[in-house]
């Protein structure tokens, strides 16, 4: 079938070729190392890796190589199951975080543990489970399902969730609790939280008994009632921290009320569907200054994306700066530093500084290798080998297989002063 | 498990019979029988033989944003668990591919739940294991897979197996457990939809229009 007939077909064929070139079966692990990891998992209790969907008969009933039906039957578990990926589950049900340890549940929920974090899973039902964070930090994504019932316990704090994503940390030593919301809403109960604090997307709660207070950053602490929790009001000494003033071009309304969730999600959906100009037009009709001052974090994030994809760099820059000023502790605000670096590369300068800021704020962020690599390339172009050499060496030590590894090796080899990787 | 044994640095385990080639050089049918009989050397040989294929299919199915190493292991754990149900040892490779495709489809469905929950508003760029430093290509790949994510999971898988993995229609049908005509409809429909979405992605349009321009700007 000759598919490369129209311009669109030719473009799709180019993209197919790109995928074939870039996505291959090579791995940085040696064959020995890969099999050793497999052997380790084979030695674990079966519940550590079994997937509920695999249970059932597999039959291949044909004498020819590829004909015949291949059937999997799936047994519906009466309760959730989970597996530990990239880590180990000991006999006491304790999970200790290693490089990329995840607890993956059969309903799609998961918890990603930072290195050295300890957690346990208890009280597993068909609707959820309790994930107990003994110490350390983890990112939690709970699949939104009807009547989902999950609890994340961190020290003396309980976080009740239905469908949401957040980062939570607990330090036994400092008796410090920290929770950053990404999406959805949760209710936090525990010391100093009274009958419960509702947190929504973009908010950050931290503190604890040792500090003698809980602090909420970003948005409004909700006093609206939640299922099974009575209406609440902020409990003293709960402290509201105002967002620090910045050099924003427009005056900011401190802690404005977030819009209704449906409106906030609409822009995200429109961006996902490629309707960038529609989002920009809506923002401009609403008033860009007003949007920057009062829009929710999700709205600003969607607007920034729309502006970047539509090539409206000046608008994108304003939105990204507003994200950082109004929601400084949020992940999108930290990511904004990377995007501001990309915009700065187009003109205006300051890209290296933005990339350095991103790496400083998010050393393990999704764009860290990109930011580091971009900084290296800019230094090479602007100041030559002497400036880029040490950065190249450090890049290779951090990201030996990163997207800029080949360029870093060249720079490091050419540099007379940089120590060889 | 019976497969646990002292790690062997050499895979050359002689099959019974002085004239038999070592298991590492045996055909798929012989290896399948060895796995079913729980030959201690068989899992390692199966890993060496099939892990690049499994890893490639998973990467191409799930896209550049997924770290697939753990999922590769899941496929092999399932293979070792279920190989005894393989009626025709000759079809070992097809069996491996079927498990891989089923695993990939499961992961795609799970990833869609995570996206719905709101895991990431923009493309997350993990440390991509690519050789070149062409970030535009990496971004283009991510945008391409965004377009793929917008079509249903079966059509998407059919597209990947047919056009990226290069399987024939009969192989795609077997991997997806559908008839050959159904498989053809799936990947043809997927091609049309992907083309539609890709043409409306400004980044991809820009990237593809510059493909013929050779840029030495970022080469030291």
Image: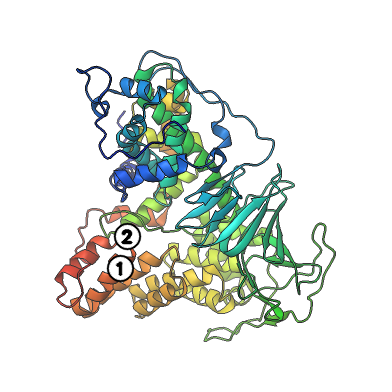
Residue A273 is at least partly visible in this image: no
Label 1: which residue?
Answer: A395
Which of marks 2 and 1 precedes in the sequence?
Answer: 1
Q: Is residue A199 found left or right of A23 in the rendered image?
A: right
Label 2: which residue?
Answer: A402
The image quarter containing residue A313 is bottom left
* Residue A60 vs residue B36, the one in the foreground: B36
* Residue A302 vs residue A327, the one in the foreground: A327
- Dot 2, how many residues are within 10 Å of its Cα: few (below 14), some (14-19), or many (20+)? many
- Dot 1, how many residues are within 10 Å of its Cα: few (below 14), some (14-19), or many (20+)? many
Badges 1 and 2: C-beta atoms under 8 Å apart? yes
State the residue at coordinates (37%, 44%).
A36
Q: Residue furthest front?
A: B6
**Element type at marker 2?**
loop
* Residue A208 vs residue A242, the one in the foreground: A208
Across and down, in percent, residue B56 comes to 34, 40
Q: Chain of mark 1?
A: A
Q: Chain of mark 2?
A: A
Q: Residue furthest right?
A: A230
Q: Is residue A52 found left or right of B217 in the rendered image?
A: right
The answer to whether marks 1 and 2 sit on the same chain is: yes
Distance between mark 1 and mark 2 Cα atoms: 8 Å
């Amino acid at each position: 079938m000759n598919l490369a007939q129209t311009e669109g077909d030719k473009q799709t064929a180019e993209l197919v070729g790109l995928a074939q070139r870039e996505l291959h079966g090579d791995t940085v692990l040696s064959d020995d190392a890969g099999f050793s990891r497999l052997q380790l998992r084979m030695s674990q209790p079966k519940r550590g890796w079994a997937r509920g969907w695999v249970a059932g008969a597999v039959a291949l009933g044909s004498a020819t190589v590829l004909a015949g039906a291949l059937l999997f039957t799936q047994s519906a578990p009466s309760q959730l199951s989970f597996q530990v990926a990239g880590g180990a589950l000991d006999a006491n049900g304790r999970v200790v975080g290693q490089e990329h340890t995840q607890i993956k549940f059969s309903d799609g929920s998961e918890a990603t543990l930072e290195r050295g974090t300890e957690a346990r899973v208890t009280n597993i039902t068909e609707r959820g489970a309790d994930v107990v964070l003994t110490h350390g930090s983890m990112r939690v994504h709970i699949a939104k399902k009807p009547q989902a019932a999950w609890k994340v316990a961190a020290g003396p704090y309980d976080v009740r969730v239905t469908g949401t994503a957040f980062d939570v940390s607990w330090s036994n030593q400092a008796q410090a609790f920290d929770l950053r919301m990404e999406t959805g809403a949760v209710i936090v109960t525990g010391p100093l939280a009274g009958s419960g604090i509702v947190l929504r997307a973009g908010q950050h709660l931290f503190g604890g008994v040792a500090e003698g207070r809980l602090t909420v950053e970003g948005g409004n602490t909700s006093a609206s009632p939640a299922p099974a929790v009575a209406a609440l009001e902020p409990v003293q000494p709960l402290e509201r921290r105002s967002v620090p003033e910045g050099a924003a071009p427009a005056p900011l309304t401190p802690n404005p009320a977030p819009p209704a969730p449906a409106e906030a999600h609409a822009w995200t959906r429109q961006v996902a569907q490629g309707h960038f100009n529609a989002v920009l037009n809506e923002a401009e009709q609403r008033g860009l200054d007003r949007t920057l001052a009062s829009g929710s974090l999700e709205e600003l994030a969607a607007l920034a994306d729309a502006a970047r994809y539509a090539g409206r760099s000046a608008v994108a820059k304003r939105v990204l700066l507003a994200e950082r000023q109004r929601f400084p502790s949020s992940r999108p605000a930290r990511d904004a530093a990377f995007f501001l670096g990309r915009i700065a590369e187009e003109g205006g300068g300051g890209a290296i500084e933005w990339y350095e800021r991103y790496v400083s704020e998010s050393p393990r962020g999704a764009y860290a290798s990109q930011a580091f690599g971009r900084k290296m390339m800019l230094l090479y172009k602007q100041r030559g080998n002497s400036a880029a050499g040490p950065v190249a060496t450090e890049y290779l030590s951090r990201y030996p297989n990163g997207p800029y590894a080949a360029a870093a090796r060249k720079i490091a080899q050419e540099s007379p002063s940089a120590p060889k990787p | 498990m019976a497969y646990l044994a002292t790690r062997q640095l050499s895979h050359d385990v002689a099959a019974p019979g002085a004239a038999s080639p070592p298991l590492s050089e045996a055909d798929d049918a012989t290896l399948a029988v060895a796995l079913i009989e729980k030959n201690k050397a068989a899992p390692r040989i199966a890993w060496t033989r099939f892990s690049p294929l499994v890893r490639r299919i998973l990467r191409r199915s799930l896209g550049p944003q997924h770290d697939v190493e753990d999922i590769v292991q899941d496929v092999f754990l399932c293979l070792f668990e279920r190989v005894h149900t393989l009626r025709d040892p000759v079809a070992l490779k097809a069996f491996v591919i079927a498990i891989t495709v089923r695993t990939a489809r499961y992961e795609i469905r799970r990833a869609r739940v995570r996206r719905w929950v709101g895991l990431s508003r923009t493309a997350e760029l993990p440390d991509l294991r690519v050789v070149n430093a062409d970030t535009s290509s990496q971004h283009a790949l991510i945008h391409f897979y965004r377009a793929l994510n917008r079509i249903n999971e079966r059509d998407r898988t059919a597209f990947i197996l047919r056009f990226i993995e290069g399987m024939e229609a009969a192989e795609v049908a077997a991997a997806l457990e559908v008839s050959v005509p159904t498989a053809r409809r799936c990947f043809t429909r997927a091609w049309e939809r992907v083309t539609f979405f890709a043409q409306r992605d400004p980044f991809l349009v820009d990237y593809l229009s510059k493909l013929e321009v050779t840029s030495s700007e970022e080469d030291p």
